[in-house]
Image (cartoon, rainbow, N blue to C red):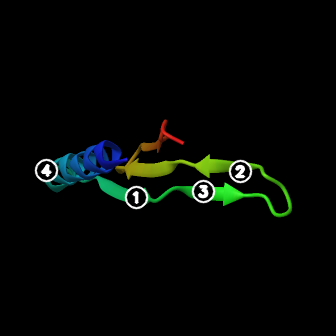
Amino acid sequence: MILWTFFHCEFKKRLKMKASLGNLSINYIDGHLIKIDNTNLGTTEPYKIIIKNNTTTLIAYLYEDNL
């Protein structure tokens, strides 16, 4: 978990540097655990990174492997 947090922070920092050089808009949406009531089922919603410029939109999903 600590390694994932470090990677996530480094990734955000590098994207911010790139965004400051151009006309990029970057949004981060944190993922979370989704549990279904009255069951033992659950799933993980991934982190989302939305990168936009004037003509293109890129959506990246970052999943955690260690559940």
- How far apart in space, not on screen, are marks 3 and 4 (Cα)? 34 Å
Furthest toward the bottom, the residue is: 37
Q: Which mark is residue 42?
A: 2
Do tag 2 and tag 3 residues touch (Cβ < 8 Å)?
A: yes
First in sequence: mark 1 or mark 2? 1
- How far apart in space, not on screen, are marks 2 and 3 (Cα)? 7 Å
Q: Can you tell which of label 1 and label 4 is closer to the viewer? A: 1
Q: Can you tell which of label 1 and label 2 is closer to the viewer? A: 2
Give the amino acid type for the residue marked by disc 3 in the picture.
Leu
Residue at image x 37%, y 47%? 1
Residue at image x 78%, y 52%? 40
Give the amino acid type for the residue marked by disc 4 in the picture.
Leu
Q: Can you tell which of label 2 and label 4 is closer to the viewer? A: 2
Give the amino acid type for the residue marked by disc 1 in the picture.
Tyr
Furthest toward the right, the residue is: 38
First in sequence: mark 2 or mark 3? 3
Q: Which mark is residue 33?
A: 3
First in sequence: mark 1 or mark 4? 4
Q: Which residue is mark 4?
A: 21
First in sequence: mark 2 or mark 4? 4
Secondary element at image label 3: strand
Q: Which mark is residue 28?
A: 1
Give the amino acid type for the residue marked by disc 2 in the picture.
Gly
